[in-house]
Image: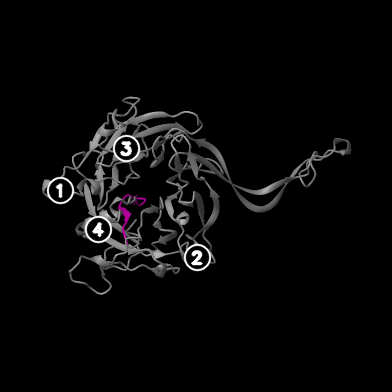
Amino acid sequence: MGEDTDATPTLNHRGFLPDHNYVTEADIISTVEFNHTGELLATGDKGGRVVIFQREPESKTEPFSQGEYNVYSTFQSHEPEFDYLKSLEIEEKINKIRWLPQQNAAHFLLSTNDKTIKLWKVSERDKRPEGYNLKDEEGRIKDISTVTSLQVPVLKPMDLMVEVSPRRVFANAHTYHVNSISVNSDYETYMSADDLRINLWHLDITDRSFNIVDIKPANMEDLTEVITAAEFHPHHCNLFVYSSSKGTLRLCDMREAALCDKHSKLFEEPEDPSARSFFSEIISSVSDVKFSHSGRYLLTRDYLTAKVWDLNMESKPLETYQVHDYLRSKLCSLYENDCIFDKFECAWNGSDSVIMTGAYNNFFRMFDRNTKRDVTLEASRESSKPRAVLKPRRVCAAGGKRRKDDISVDSLDFTKKILHTAWHPNENIIAIAATNNLYIFQDKLNSEMH
């Protein structure tokens, strides 16, 4: 998985590229999420749409077709709204999507914009009833006087139809913008987090939620930090973690108190005074936090690094990975063009041995926790041919020695950024959102990376 190996992911699908070359704001992908089996993949965009992709079943005649994802369903999840009390426009942009574990033939997912969370049911229909007694074939009610005999309705086969219907709308519980939703391992409750509060919901109850974290100060002038992300523990329904703009993680236990303002554990790395600068506080803000599948570790992403924390060690991270350390000298210009406030996500592979996160120039990074090797790969139209092998990329600092194919830090395109990534829960399949393009890569050559 290092920079000198050919064991890099093979692009097993062309990628989902728009027909037009121009990028509209509404087409920009804002979240990517596999379901619990990995058979379905959902993306949300700034236009409020959700697109669900389904993995093709394995074919004996076409062995390469397995793993390809094709569009399964598309629907409008959120519409733009206007808050008349505060004279604020509420964007339709989908901030997060979370799947519920499948318990019957239908699939359920939660999607949220800044204010409103919705529960959607996705189901298939391949039969239709025929032979009604009181309706004609067009569905109109018959005149009862014309009904002279009774018949038993029958189910007739029809073309497969995917139906998406809204089942619940959870609204009016957040004053600030929702940045996270997370389904609990009890599969009955979920939480939603905004800048200052975290609410606990029951999936069947829409008119009330319980506030479990509130960090809003009595005087807003005393505000020093905001909540940036939150997630439930994968196995213990009483535990959850939330991250802050100060770079801290707080693990909370709902058994200790109804209001979890007092954390059980605080994970924080002491700052090196010699490295302190004007940008220190901005780049230390945690943009994403993810529990490992085992529940033993936490993965966090700040502006320059990805860190792995052990739940049993609060004093410092277990591992720190430099994502793009060559940007340290560019922080001033990144501050001026607002890139320093970009919120990158991170992901674990199914066995918690490899982590992945995005960078600029449509690069994304993978770090093998066992071998300590890392690789930089690029999601681009050039690499979007089926079964094309991705070549490792390398960025060299300004003025440094350049090898062939190296890219200078000065020539990076900061408008192309990989903010949203997802990893299949069991296999080496990853989904990468690059602006308005979705790329799906599959590693068929290298089993060590899983």
Nearer the camera: disc 3 or disc 2: 2
- Observer-side mark, 1 or 4, equals 4
Q: Amino acid at mark 3?
A: Val
Q: CA distance from mark 3 to mark 1?
A: 27 Å
Identify the disc placed on residue 241.
Answer: 3
**Residue 294 lies in magenta, yes or no?**
no
Q: Earlier in the sequence, mark 4 or mark 2?
A: 2
Quadrant location, the N terminus: bottom left
Across and down, in percent, residue 140 comes to 78, 42
The disc label shown at residue 333, or none: 4
**Quadrant assignment for the C terminus:** bottom left
Q: Which-is-in-front pick, marks 4 and 2? A: 4
Amino acid type, mark 4? Ser
Discs 1, 4 touching: Cβ within 8 Å? no
- Give amino acid for label 1: Arg
Which numbered dot is residue 20?
Answer: 2
